[in-house]
Every structure is written in structure tokens, then in C-alpha cells.
Image: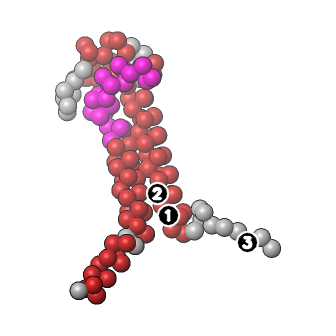
Amino acid sequence: MIGYLRLPLSWIAHSDRVGIPLMRVAIAIVFLWIGALKFAPYEADSITPFVANSPFMSFFYEHPAEYKAHLTREGELKPAERAWQTSNNTYGFSDGLGTVEIAIGLLTLLGVFSRRWGIVGATRSRS
């Protein structure tokens, strides 16, 4: 009976060699995806309340206290509100946040592949 379980148990015991890099790739895909979405105006409009009410990020907006009068629903296009969002630096902040998220995703991928190729963590022999 133990003979039948030896192969599956061995595979499970050594699955960290595949599982950990795959998990890092999945995290990178999520960061790249969400970071790319930050360049879409509807995504920037939808994070406006979070940024405007944040004590750490509200200074990026020109008029953080006035955002409630200029909110749009998901997918709704109002040119006057879009112009206000542009003057409020909503899209500039969103683009910057997207750039940071894409950089995190790319660095995560770089970490996965550099470990795989032996670039990071390789020991040098001293002669």
C-alpha cells in the first residue's frame, strides 16, 4: 500500500520547486493587470474617493474636498466631470499609481526568472 503512495507523496513534498515560482508569476500577473487598468479613465474615477479621503495620498489632488460633487458612476461619461477630474490631477495620480504597480509586477517577474536562471543567489567561488 505504501508503494502506491510513494510517488504522489514524493511529488507533493517537492512541489515547492514549481509552486513558489508559479505563485510569484500569479502575483506579478495581478499587479500588471491592476496597474494597466489604472491608465483607464473609469478606473481613475472609481478610486477618487479612496485617494481624496486618504491622509497619505490626498495631497496629490488639487481639490480633494470637492470630489463628491464630481463623481460619476462606473462606465458613465460626463465631459464636464471628466474635465474637472483632469484639472484635479485624478488621472495623473492614477497613471503614477499604475506605473508603480506595473514596476512591482515586472520586478516580481524579474525575481522569478533571475532565480530560475541562477542570476540571483548564485555563489561565487573564490580562487
Alpha-carbon distance for marks 3 and 1? 22 Å
Alpha-carbon distance for marks 2 and 3? 27 Å
Which span is picked out in magenta? 36-57
Alpha-carbon distance for marks 1 and 2? 6 Å
Q: Which mark is residue 4?
A: none
Amino acid type at mark 3: Ser
Asked if disc 1 and disc 2 are in contact, CB closer than 8 Å, the reply is: yes
In the rendered view, does 62 fall on the left or right side of 125?
A: left
Circle 2 residue:
109
- The spot of residue 124 in percent (x, y) is 70, 68
Q: Nearer the viewer, residue 16 or 73?
A: 16
Classify mark 2: residues with Cα within 10 Å, few (<14), some (14-19) or many (20+). some
Circle 3 residue:
125
Circle 1 residue:
113
Q: Earlier in the sequence, mark 3 or mark 1?
A: 1
Amino acid type at mark 1: Phe
Residue 80 visible in rendering: no
Q: Earlier in the sequence, mark 2 or mark 3?
A: 2
Q: Is residue 71 above or below residue 20?
A: above
Amino acid type at mark 2: Leu
Q: Is residue 118 magenta?
A: no
